[in-house]
Each structure stands twice: as structure tokens, then as C-alpha cells.
Image: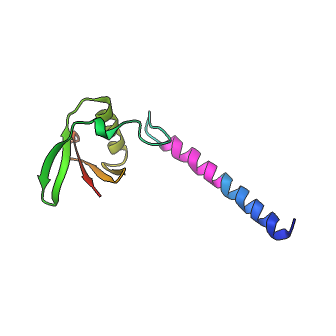
Amino acid sequence: MTAEVNFLIKLRDGCAMILDAANERLESLAPPGASPTGPSYDVNKIQWQSAQGTKGPYEKTDGDQSPDYKALLQGLKFHKGKMNIDGSFYWLFENAVTVGRKKT
């Protein structure tokens, strides 16, 4: 093997170690019950109502007590009230119960 091939192998292995360490750290920071492969809830199972805001139409839900809503609410609180999921922006209203969503 040439010196360049050995260098590239060591570089690849080093990057893999960094990636593994970053993934372990991210998993340790995840909220309880969160799945490392994505959300452990289905936002399409939540009952949404159409609404009109100053920036246009959006959907909202407030107080749906389903497990999916509760998990979404927990995720939003963990992410300081805002996050993107599958092409939609989700936010938590000031009352800490109402959730809004809008396509991005």
C-alpha cells in the first residue's frame, strides 16, 4: 500500500470514531423516551384545526390528550418551543398547551 492509501484509511477511521462519539453524546442529550431514529409519535394522528394568522393559514391543536400529542409537546419543550418535522414547522404557543404547525 502506498503512503496515501494508509493516510486515507487512518483519516476514515478517525472520522468514524468522531461520528460515533458525536452520536453517543446526542443520544445522551435526547429527552426521555425519544427514539434515536426519529420521533416516537405520529403527528398525523393528532387532531388539527385550521386557523388563520397574521402570516397566513396554519393548523393548531390545543389539549388533545393523545400519547402522540403528549410526545410532540414534550419534544417541543425540549427544543425550546420550535422544531421542524417532515417539511412542517411546529411551534408552541405561550400558553404551553397549544401547538401550531405550518408547511415550510
Q: Quadrant of residue 48?
A: top left
Nearer to me, 54 or 42: 42
Residue 40 placement, left or right of 23: left
Magenta segment, principal secondary structure? helix
Residue 20 placement, left or right of 1: left
What is the span of residues highlighted in magenta in the rendered image? Answer: 18-29
Mark yes or no: residue 94 visible: no
Q: Residue at x 34, y 35 (%)?
A: 71
Q: Quadrant of residue 33?
A: top left
* Above/below status of 53 relative to 34: below
Nearer to me, 33 or 50: 50
Q: Residue at x 36, y 42 (%)?
A: 75
Q: Residue at x 75, y 65 (%)?
A: 8
Q: Residue at x 46, y 41 (%)?
A: 30
* Above/below status of 84 relative to 97: below
Nearer to me, 63 or 5: 5
Residue 12 placement, left or right of 21: right
- For the C terminus, the image quarter is bottom left
Q: Quadrant of residue 32?
A: top left
**Residue 96, percent from left and from top:** 23, 41
- For the N terminus, the image quarter is bottom right
Q: Residue furthest right?
A: 1
**Residue 15, percent from left and from top:** 67, 58
**Residue 80, percent from left and from top:** 33, 49
Mark yes or no: residue 84 visible: yes
Residue 4 on the magenta segment: no
